[in-house]
């Protein structure tokens, strides 16, 4: 039997309890639509970068220099270097995993494709931002289709063209 193609996916979307609150965001409809013909390759940037489960929530903050930082909402800890270092390492590893695309969890400061909230000087300046990992993945694997979970049907159409 031919090997199934492999899709990268935010791990919480297939039921892994890695979210800040120790829960998942399983998307059963998406799983049903894709799992017969594709394998999932789950990734959770925050958990794999060493943040705990459960953990404090985080948000993206834009500095005057234009750099985005991911900051803990309670402790004000700056997790940017820790997560970006992990992203560089993970993206290297993904070179030989041959993912045919990625489905990202919306609204996450690491995983969102175009729905992350961005703050500047404490004020919300956009709710259409890219999460840190999603942005780096998209730049590195620019020919791979990438969508958020609500667009999985569009993703399927692209793969099956
Ligand atoms: S970092 Fe991404 S994969 Fe991990 S829990 Fe948050 S949205 Fe899900």
Image: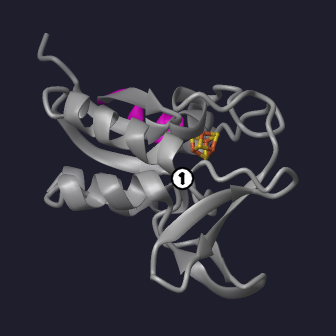
The correct choice, above or below, for 152 with respect to 122 in the image is: above
What stretch of residues is rendered in magenta?
31-37
The quarter of the picture where residue 138 lies is: bottom left
The quadrant of the rendering that contains the N terminus is top left
Numbered disc total:
1
The quadrant of the rendering that contains the C terminus is bottom left
Q: Is 35 contained in the magenta span?
A: yes
Identify the residue at the far right of this view.
74
Location of residue 102 in the rendering, given as x and y in whole percent from the top left corner:
35, 47
Q: Which residue is mark 1?
A: 80
Residue 152 visible at all: no
The correct choice, above or below, for 48 with respect to 105 in the image is: above
- Does residue 23 appear to the left or right of 74 in the view shown? left
- Does residue 31 appear to the left or right of 140 in the view shown? right
Is 102 in front, or is 60?
60
Q: Quadrant of ligand 1?
A: top right
Location of residue 34 in the rendering, given as x and y in whole percent from the top left corner:
40, 37
- Does residue 24 appear to the left or right of 148 in the view shown? right
SS class of the residue under badge 1? helix
The correct choice, above or below, for 62 with respect to 102 in the image is: below
The correct choice, above or below, for 138 with respect to 7 in the image is: below
- Does residue 103 appear to the left or right of 144 in the view shown? right
Location of residue 128 in the rendering, given as x and y in whole percent from the top left corner:
55, 80
Residue 160 visible at all: yes
Q: Residues within 10 Å of mark 1 (few under 14, many from 20)?
A: some
Residue in the image at 51% along x and 35% along y: 32
Identify the residue at the far top of this view.
1
Residue in the image at 52% along x and 28% along y: 48
Is 13 in front, or is 131?
131
Residue in the image at 71% along x and 27% along y: 17
Q: Is 136 contained in the magenta span?
A: no
Residue in the image at 72% along x and 28% along y: 52
């Amino acid at each position: 039997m031919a090997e199934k193609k492999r899709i990268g996916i935010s791990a919480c979307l297939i039921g892994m309890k890695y979210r800040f609150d120790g829960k998942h965001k399983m998307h059963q409809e998406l799983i049903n639509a894709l799992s017969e013909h594709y394998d999932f390759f789950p990734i959770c940037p925050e958990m794999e970068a060493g943040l705990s489960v459960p953990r404090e929530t985080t948000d993206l903050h834009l500095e005057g220099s234009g750099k985005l930082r991911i900051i803990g909402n309670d402790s004000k800890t700056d997790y940017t270097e820790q997560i970006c270092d992990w992203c560089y390492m993970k993206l290297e590893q993904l070179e030989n995993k041959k993912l045919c695309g990625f489905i990202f969890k919306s609204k996450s400061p690491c995983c969102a494709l175009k729905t992350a909230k961005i703050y500047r000087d404490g004020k919300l300046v956009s709710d259409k931002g890219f999460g840190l990992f999603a942005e780096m993945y998209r730049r590195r694997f620019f020919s791979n289709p990438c969508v958020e979970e609500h667009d999985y049907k569009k993703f399927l159409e692209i793969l099956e063209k």
